[in-house]
Amino acid sequence: MMLIWLLSVTLLVLGITATVLGVRLRKRSKHLNYIHEKVLDILDQGTYERLLVFDSDAEVSRLLNDMNRLLEHAHLAKADYANQEKEMRNMLSNISHDLKTPLTVVLGYSETLLHSPSLTDAERRVMTEKIQDKAQEVLRLMHSFFDLAKLESGDRELELRRVNISELCRVKMLSFYELLTKLGVHVELDIPEQDVFGRANEEALDRVLDNLITNAMKYGADGKVLGISVLKREGECVTIQVWDRGKGIPEKEHTRVFERMYTLEDSRNRMYQGSGLGLTITKRLVERMGGRIDVHSVPYERTVFSFTLEAL
């Protein structure tokens, strides 16, 4: 009798277990079929719609969460690719414009030289000098373009070593002093008396300073003041600031100033027209030296480009 009772209980337990397993398997099969259909929809329609997470099945829930993270990553990658593609189209368009302008001048003057035998020697000299200037402008643009390409591809290795940042900033500002004086721009230096050293590549740092000072001259000369500040706190990084009191950069443009080929609309006809690649190259160089760069601008009060490097 006891044996029959135990057998009945065992059969009942097995029946309940089989029923529960059957329900779970059907539910899991339903969940897996849902995942299959959603993945097919995503592939067919090219969307990145997130999958519904089922809390009733821990393993399926983990799978769905992982898939949602993967979809989010794919969505961000696609958006980044689209943004880079847009930047590349804009860059090629701007490069075409910036190449076309000086080349048109070169062709115009060279045609005049060829077909105007009555020109005086002085007139020919002036035209030849303009052709030379425009040819150099094209060369500078091409150099900037290839420099940026090398930086972004990682082909260019920067050897970092101990650099006297204070001295480099003084020398760099001194190289611009005569030109700034002619423009009526007052120079202010805020550099500690005791030399400040940082981990950097001297050539790259020299170019960063050159780009930032040139940029400040281009946009901030109307403020009549341009300065460099070197800040260092014990045990922390070195901060270098290049600032001016010119018309500044609109707040809505702050996030765009480091984009490829970015220029303010009225900058193309300024005395110091650039390629639009200077700040992009500057950002890449600072990052390759392990630093970061930011911009803050209040028109006619203070526009400052500030970047940090590891202190030594």
Image (cartoon, helix red, strand yellow):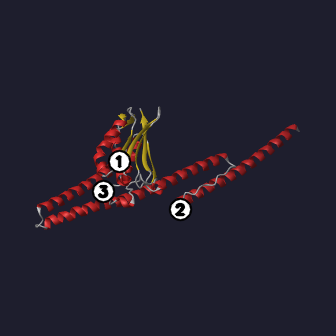
Kindly state the secondary structure of the residue where label 1 is placed: strand
Q: Amino acid at mark 1?
A: His
Among the two numbered marks 2 and 1 on one chain, the one whose residue lies closer to the N terminus: 2
Q: Which residue corresponds to the image point at 74% horizontal and 48% vertical from the top-left?
A: 20
Distance Cα–Cα, label 2 vs label 1:
61 Å
Q: Which residue corresponds to the image point at 21% horizontal and 63% vertical from the top-left?
A: 107
Q: Which residue corresponds to the image point at 64% horizontal and 48% vertical from the top-left?
A: 61
Numbered mark located on residue 266 in the image? none
Among the two numbered marks 3 and 2 on one chain, the one whose residue lies closer to the N terminus: 2
Q: Which residue is mark 2?
A: 45
Q: Are marks 3 and 1 in contact (CB under 8 Å)?
A: no
Badge 3: residue crowd in 10 Å (few <14, some 14–19, many ≥20): few
Distance Cα–Cα, label 3 vs label 2:
51 Å
Can you name the residue that lies furthest to the right here?
Answer: 1
The residue lying toward the viewer, choosing from 211 and 192, is 192
Q: Is residue 152 visible?
A: no
Q: Which residue corresponds to the image point at 17% horizontal and 65% vertical from the top-left?
A: 111
The residue lying toward the viewer, choosing from 60 and 168, is 168
Residue 163 location, quadrant? top left
Q: Which residue is mark 1?
A: 186
Kindly state the secondary structure of the residue where label 2 is placed: helix
Badge 1: residue crowd in 10 Å (few <14, some 14–19, many ≥20): some
Numbered mark located on residue 271 in the image? 3
Instruction: Classify residue 51 as left or right of residue 153.
Output: right
